[in-house]
Amino acid sequence: QVQFVESGGGLVQPGGSLRLSCAASGDGFNINSMGWYRQAPGKQRELVAGISDSVTNVGGSVKGRFTISRDTAKSTVYLQMNSLKFEDTAVYLCFAWITPTVTRMAARYWGQGTQVTVSS
C-alpha cells in the first residue's frame, strides 16, 4: 500500500512563490511517474505537471512559471511555483502511477491534497 506525505501549500501574494513536495512510501511496487493535478471550486480537475524518468509534461496554463522535478531515490516529486496568480488558487493533488510487483497492474494513486491560496 502506498502512502503520500504532501507539504508546502499555503497562502501567498500574487507574484510570489511556493514549493510543493510529495513523498511516496510503501513496499511492493515500482513508481512509474509522479505529478500534480489541481482542482479549484466549480472547475474540472486540471493536470498541472507530471514527470516520468527524465520526461516532463507541464500544463499550458502554468508553463514557464511552474517547474516539476523528482528525486527518484526518495520517491519524491517537487513542484516549484513562481509568479503565482489568483487563478492558481486550488487544491493541489499529488499523484503517482504505480505498478505493484505482484500484480503488475499499473494504477494511479492520489495524495490527500494541499491547499494553495493566492490572495492579496
Image (cartoon, rainbow, N blue to C red):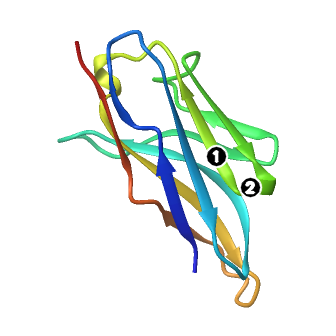
**Mark 2 surroundings: few (<14), some (14-19) or many (≥20) residues within 10 A:** few
According to the picture, the residue beneath numbered tag 2 turns out to be 74
Residue 81 percent across, percent down from the top left: 51, 24
Q: Disc 2 to disc 1, how far (Cα)? A: 9 Å
**Mark 1 surroundings: few (<14), some (14-19) or many (≥20) residues within 10 A:** many
Residue 67 percent across, percent down from the top left: 62, 27
Classify residue 65 by image quadrant.
Answer: top right
> Label 2 is placed on what type of residue?
Lys
- In the image shown, does 64 or 120 lie closer to the viewer? 120
Q: Image height check: is 15 above or below 103?
A: above
- In the image shown, does 27 or 41 lie closer to the viewer? 27
Say which mark, if any, is on residue 55.
none
* 79 left or right of 40 in image: right
Q: How many marks?
A: 2
Badge 1 marks a residue whose secondary structure is: strand
* 19 left or right of 12 in image: right
The label nearer to you, 2 versus 1, is 2
Residue 26 percent across, percent down from the top left: 64, 75
Residue sticking out furthest to the top: 15
Residue 8 percent across, percent down from the top left: 46, 38
Residue sticking out furthest to the left: 42
Q: Image height check: is 41 above or below 58?
A: below
Residue depicted at 57% across the width and 81% down the height = 1
Q: Image height check: is 83 above or below 113?
A: above
Residue depicted at 46% across the width and 12% down the height = 83
Say which mark, if any, is on residue 77.
1
Q: Image height check: is 104 above or below 112?
A: below
> Label 1 is placed on what type of residue?
Val
